[in-house]
């Protein structure tokens, strides 16, 4: 049996191990200098915005909503076709997630559908840069100004992506990144809030640390969602490697774009830099799950993100008419695109996918 080409593969090297060892030896496992350094270095990737590191991407989303001041009764427009943390974080902050359909080409929330979903209770919207492709941020910025809404970004999958030269994470009142091991860079677990507002950054830090800026003078009811120095040290090393890994993802994607046949390859919007957290095709002429099983038998790992749209999960249990979301949930299939792929791996992926595609058509 041939080895499986995995759908994702975190890369951890000697430098990360040395960084962890340095922190462990220092004795400052939490509350040391690494977290502040990581925040400072990450800031360079988001047009020098304020950065606050958290213990997960989910905490980053949650604390961003609390820090900006989303209130019970506030509606926040989000896609249903995303990871559950997107809408969960709205609900956890006390807001009401309102699910909106996606656009066909880029799998991201549809700005026209967003405008149609605005009600007097709408306070904010949060597009997700799904699979590493930036959402239509220029349009969201215009909608935010026209309707006086707050723009948040779920950038968990899109480190270093950009639109018209402006990086994701630098468009709205707050954005959240994830450093979970399968993301384009990792800190083990971790997340980051980015914001242009010093006051929002201060409030995110409050919620991160029990509601306290001054010891025992708690201003709000807060959490412990702090990042440890161990995690920050790993993140700092990975951040230095992000650019090279992103280039490799883009080169891998280019090879797949040019060579795959019989499936719909992912287009890129004008002015967008896609960072290919996932390389997601649409399987249109045959059953996607059978297709995935067949390429799996021939050694190609793949992933289905996401088979059940959020509005239909038992946690929300809504009946809604979101046709593009339903179609994507049936057709989307993510192929390996990670930086560890060799040229031989890429050729095997093309050979197997093209052969299964042509057999089923
Ligand atoms: C991974 C992810 C999150 C959550 O990040 P964690 O670090 O796993 O908590 C949120 N939104 C999206 C779109 C994600 O992919």
Image: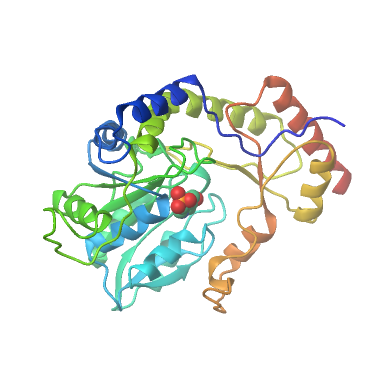
* Left or right relative to 232: residue 250: right
Which quadrant of the view contains residue 323? bottom right
Q: Quadrant of the N terminus?
A: top right
* Left or right relative to 210: residue 345: right
Which x, y percent locates residue 154? 40, 52
Q: Residue at x 81, y 35 (%)?
A: 352
Which x, y percent locates residue 129? 45, 49
**Looking at this view, is 351 or 5 the one in front?**
5
* Left or right relative to 146: residue 101: right
**Looking at this view, is 160 or 191 the one in front?**
191
Determine if residue 145 is in view.
no
Q: Residue at x 58, y 72 (%)?
A: 312
**Looking at this view, is 287 or 10 the one in front?**
10
Which x, y percent locates residue 294? 83, 45
Which x, y percent locates residue 286? 80, 54
Q: Residue at x 43, y 22 (%)?
A: 18
* Left or right relative to 66: residue 126: right
Which quadrant of the view contains residue 76? bottom left
Applied colour scheme: rainbow
Determine if residue 153 is in view.
yes
| Tally of marks | 0
Q: Residue at x 41, y 25 (%)?
A: 21
């Amino acid at each position: 049996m041939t080895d499986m080409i995995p759908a994702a593969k975190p890369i951890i090297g000697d430098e990360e191990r040395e960084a962890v060892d340095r922190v462990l030896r220092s004795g400052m496992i939490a509350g040391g200098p690494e977290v502040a350094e990581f925040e400072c270095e990450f800031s360079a990737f988001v047009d020098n915005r304020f950065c606050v590191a958290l213990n997960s991407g989910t905490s980053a989303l949650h604390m961003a909503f609390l820090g900006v001041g989303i209130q019970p009764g506030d509606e926040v427009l989000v896609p249903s076709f995303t990871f559950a943390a997107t809408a969960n974080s709205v609900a956890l902050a006390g807001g009401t997630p309102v699910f909106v359909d996606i656009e066909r080409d880029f799998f991201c929330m549809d700005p026209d559908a967003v405008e149609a979903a605005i009600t007097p209770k709408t306070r904010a919207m949060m597009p997700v840069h799904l699979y590493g492709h930036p959402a239509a941020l220029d349009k969201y910025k215009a909608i935010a100004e026209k309707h006086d809404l707050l723009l948040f970004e779920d950038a968990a999958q899109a480190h270093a992506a950009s639109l018209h030269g402006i990086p994701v994470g630098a468009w709205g009142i707050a954005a959240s990144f994830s450093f979970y091991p399968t993301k384009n860079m990792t800190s083990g677990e971790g997340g980051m809030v980015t914001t242009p507002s010093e006051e929002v950054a201060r409030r995110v830090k409050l919620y991160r640390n029990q509601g306290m800026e001054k010891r025992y003078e708690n201003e709000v009811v807060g959490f412990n969602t702090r990042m440890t120095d161990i995690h920050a040290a790993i993140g700092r090393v990975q951040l230095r490697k992000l650019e090279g890994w992103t280039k490799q993802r883009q080169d891998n994607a280019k090879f797949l774009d040019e060579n795959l046949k019989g499936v719909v390859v992912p287009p890129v919007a004008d002015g967008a830099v896609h960072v290919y957290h996932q390389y997601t095709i649409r399987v249109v002429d045959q059953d996607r799950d059978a297709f995935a099983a067949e390429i799996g038998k021939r050694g190609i790992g793949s992933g289905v993100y996401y088979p059940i749209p959020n509005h239909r999960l038992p946690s929300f249990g809504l009946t809604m008419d979101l046709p593009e979301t339903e179609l994507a949930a049936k057709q989307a299939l993510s192929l390996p695109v990670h930086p560890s792929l060799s040229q031989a791996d890429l050729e095997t992926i093309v050979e197997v996918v093209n052969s299964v595609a042509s057999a089923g058509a």
